[in-house]
Image (spheres, rainbow, N blue to C red):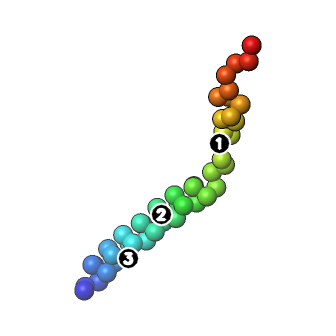
C-alpha cells in the first residue's frame, strides 16, 4: 500500500468516526420530549 492510499484510508476512517461520534452525542444529550398522559387523554368525556 502506498502513502497516498494509506492517507486516504486514514482520512476517510477519521471522518466516519467523527460523524458517528457527533450523532451519538446528539442522541445522548437531546432532552426527552414531554409525552402526554395517554390514559387521561384517551378517557371518554364524563357527562
Task: Determine which quarter of the picture holds residue 25.
Answer: bottom right
Task: Give the image location of residue 27, x and y in percent.
Answer: 57, 55
Task: Give the image location of residue 1, x and y in percent.
Answer: 25, 86
- Between tags 2 and 1, which lies in front? 1
Q: Is residue 24 left or right of residue 33?
A: left
Residue density around tag 3, few if under 14, some if 14–19, many if 20 or more, within 10 Å: few
Name the outermost residue toward the top.
47
Q: Which residue is mark 3?
A: 10
Q: CA distance from mark 1 to mark 3?
A: 38 Å
Q: Is residue 37 shown above or below 11?
A: above
Q: Are marks 2 and 1 in contact (CB under 8 Å)?
A: no
Q: Is residue 45 left or right of residue 12?
A: right
Name the residue at 25% across, 85% down.
Answer: 2
Q: Is residue 7 shown above or below 29?
A: below
Callout 3 secondary element: helix
Residue density around tag 2, few if under 14, some if 14–19, many if 20 or more, within 10 Å: few
- Between tags 1 and 3, which lies in front? 1
Name the outermost residue toward the left.
1
Callout 2 secondary element: helix
Q: Tell me which numbered mark, 3 or 2, is placed earlier along the sequence.
A: 3
**Tag shown at residue 33:** 1
Q: Are marks 3 and 2 in contact (CB under 8 Å)?
A: no
Residue density around tag 1, few if under 14, some if 14–19, many if 20 or more, within 10 Å: few
Nearer-the-camera pick, 36 or 28: 36
Q: Which residue is mark 2?
A: 20
Q: Is residue 27 shown above or below 18?
A: above
Name the residue at 33% across, 75% down.
Answer: 9
Amino acid at each position: 500500500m502506498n502513502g497516498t492510499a494509506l492517507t486516504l484510508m486514514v482520512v476517510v476512517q477519521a471522518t466516519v468516526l467523527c460523524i458517528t461520534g457527533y450523532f451519538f452525542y446528539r442522541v445522548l444529550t437531546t432532552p426527552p420530549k414531554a409525552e402526554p398522559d395517554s390514559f387521561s387523554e384517551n378517557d371518554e368525556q364524563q357527562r
